[in-house]
Image: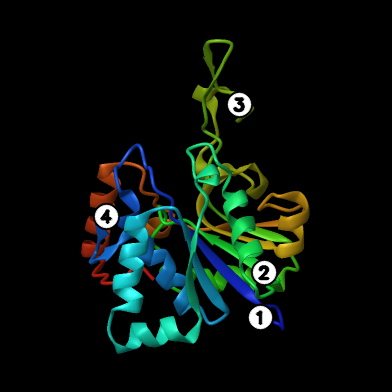
Amino acid sequence: MINGKKVLAVVLARAGSKGIPMKNVRDLLGKPLFLWSVEAGLQSKYVDKTVISSNCKNVFKEYENFYMNGGVETREIFNSGRISFIDRPDEISGDLSKNEDAVIHTLQTLKENYDVVIQLQPTSPARINNLLDRCIEAYEEGNYDSLLTATKDTPFLWRKEDGKWKYPVDKNHCCNRKMRQEFDEDEFVYHDCGNIYIVDKFVLMTTQCRIGDKPCVFEIKGINSLQIDEEFDFELIEQMAKVKGLTTLI
């Protein structure tokens, strides 16, 4: 809870990854991938409840083994009601299903009422240096209606228009473009990296969108900004953690 507002974290861990089979339950630094996001919610000082929304039997099995049949500490977490598992219908679990549909289904299934809803994607497992709580504080202190994490970059971007590659963002010619240190703050571009989304529950339920009209773009970098989309990404995060001496991604 923050400033009297109840906070819900939802971890979306559906079955059916095409790029990496059984990605959400693959081991990463000693835990199934999706559990790093679950643990981030549980370790937050503001999150009241963390829910796993999934249609995957293997995700439920890992959840059951870790929290329901685990040690004394994890069983206490399970019995406290701070964590639960919700079966997500297959019709909102496909490749083209909107994440918002799964989050709204979670809210409609729960009996409790929440004011702030957070989406934690398993494919972005690293949230070190209290990233989640820093995002929640920025969201609340700025009086925003939503927040998303993003990485900062220069507008050295190309895109294909009418079958031809063009350099449309930086107004200078690509061979006469500015150096990074010459850019004004409002000239940088920010890539929505998918690590954390925070939204006011009323905004989510009325617009069915996780981004409102007054969003905060929260810059992140380094290992926190990495997403797991390919096999190489598992190795990259593991090696970065090893070099930095990290034993946890939270």
- Distance from label 2 to label 1 (Cα)? 9 Å
If you read the primary sequence from the N terminus, does the residue marked by circle 4 or circle 1 appear first? 1
Residue 224 at x, y percent in the picture = 42, 59
Q: Residues within 10 Å of mark 4 (few under 14, many from 20)?
A: some
If you read the primary sequence from the N terminus, does the residue marked by circle 2 or circle 1 appear first? 1
Amino acid type assigned to the residue bearing label 4 in the image: Arg
> Which residue bears the numbered disc 3?
172
> Which residue bears the numbered disc 1?
2
- Distance from label 2 to label 3 (Cα)? 42 Å
Say above or below: 249 vs 227: below
> Which residue bears the numbered disc 2?
116
Say above or below: 160 vs 188: above
Q: Nearer the viewer, residue 197 or 164?
A: 197
Q: Residues within 10 Å of mark 1 (few under 14, many from 20)?
A: some
Amino acid type assigned to the residue bearing label 2 in the image: Val
Q: Nearer the viewer, residue 98 or 244?
A: 98
Residue ID at (76%, 62%): 202
For the question of whether residue 131 can be seen, the reply is yes
Residue 43 at x, y percent in the picture = 45, 78
If you read the primary sequence from the N terminus, does the residue marked by circle 4 or circle 3 appear first? 4
Amino acid type assigned to the residue bearing label 1 in the image: Ile
Q: Residues within 10 Å of mark 3 (few under 14, many from 20)?
A: few
Kindly indicate whether the residue at mark 1 contacts the one at mark 2 (C-beta within 8 angstroms): yes
Q: Nearer the viewer, mark 1 or mark 3?
A: 1
Residue 178 at x, y percent in the picture = 55, 35
Residue sitting farthest toward the top: 163
Residue ID at (43%, 55%): 13
Q: Determine which of the numbered discs, if any, sits on residue 26 in the image.
A: 4
If you read the primary sequence from the N terminus, does the residue marked by circle 2 or circle 3 appear first? 2
In the displayed structure, does residue 21 sit left or right of residue 82?
A: left
Say above or below: 250 vs 17: below
- Number of numbered discs: 4
